[in-house]
Amino acid sequence: MKYRLFIVFTLIMVLLAVVGCGKNAEISKQLSAEGSDQKTSEQSNSETPNIPDLSGMLMKEGWPTDKVPSELMEYTEGKVKNSGGEDDDYIIDVEETNEEAFANYIDKLKSSGWIISGSGEESEAIMGLYTVNFNWMDSSSKWLRINVQKDKEGEWSFDKIPPDILQPEKGTLVGGTAVLEQTESIWYFNYTYDGIDEKAAKEYMQFLIENGWSGDDTFVSKSFEWKGKTYGADIEVYETLETRTTFTCNFYLGG
């Protein structure tokens, strides 16, 4: 009798083990399927550019005609999803675009009179008091950020610059003249004029020579009296980008 009970008990345990194995196999199969789905989803997400949904913080959708200069043509090979900022620092986000479309836009800007420096993402467009920078916000180059900055028309610092250092007669001063003390008794400043090309820059240097400076088309110097002391100064053509030229000036005691 005991032997029969033992056999029955053993059979019951075997049946339970078989059922348990079946359930474990089913659970394992289900987990494996879920893991596979998750992996596929992760791979799919990794292939999609990480562009956030801007609708919740939308300030202005569409090309902001009233916020940028009329000379800055609309970016049409993409979708303007968002824009906002200040009058002198405005940001435009363009989605669903690409590098070829961006290159086409840069070419159009150049042909319409914008000064283009750099290339690719490092491109910078300049016209008058405006400077436009570009930056890809995702690795797949589908989300482009355009930053439009407006400088102020500058004023010549007559109270800080000796009167013998003459400003150009042509062009528009961009950003003013910030006179900085390099070391004790030595000062320098840069001044950028829109509307002065290479020819006009040479004319300015000739204008200085006609007013007592010595030098050539790219570099001039002069000694003079100012506020009862003797100073020396030199002016150099630092950079010319089509119709915009930057000059650099150093002046110092003891010329």
Image (spheres, rainbow, N blue to C red):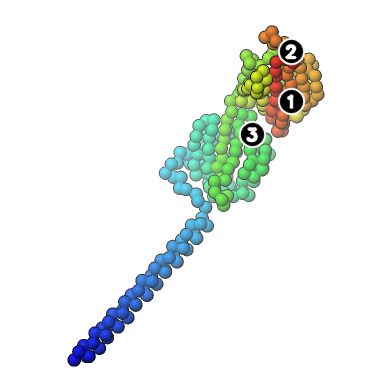
Instruction: Measure how far apart labels 3 and 2 are at the Cα level.
Output: 36 Å
For marks 1 and 2, give the CA distance: 18 Å
Name the mark nearer the viewer: 1 or 2.
2
Percent from the top left, x then y, of residue 196? 71, 27
Going from the N terminus, do you reach mark 3 or mark 2 first? 3
Q: Which mark is residue 60?
A: none
**Kind of residue at badge 3:** Ile
Q: The C terminus lies in which quarter of the figure? A: top right
Circle nearer the N terminus (1, 2): 2
Q: Quadrant of residue 109?
A: top right
Please state if 214 lies on the left or on the right of 159 as rendered: right
Residue pictured at 37% horizontal, 75% vertical:
25
Above or below, 151 relative to 54 = above
Image quarter of residue 170: top right
Residue 166's spot in the image, x, y percent? 71, 17
Disc 2 secondary structure class: strand
- Residue 224 has which mark? 2
User: What amino acid type should be assigned to the residue bearing mark 1?
Assistant: Glu
User: In this figure, which residue is indicated by the disc labeled 1?
Assistant: 236
Judging by the rendered image, the residue that carries numbered circle 3 is: 126
Picture residue at 50% right of the left edge, 34% below the top: 85
Query: Measured from the top left, where is residue 157 in percent x and y?
Result: 63, 17
Q: Is residue 69 left or right of residue 52?
A: right
Give the Cα separation between the discs numbered 1 and 3: 22 Å
C-beta proximity under 8 Å, tags 1 and 2: no
Task: Using the rendered view, name the quadrant where residue 124 is placed.
Answer: top right
Single out the residue that lies furthest toward the front: 2
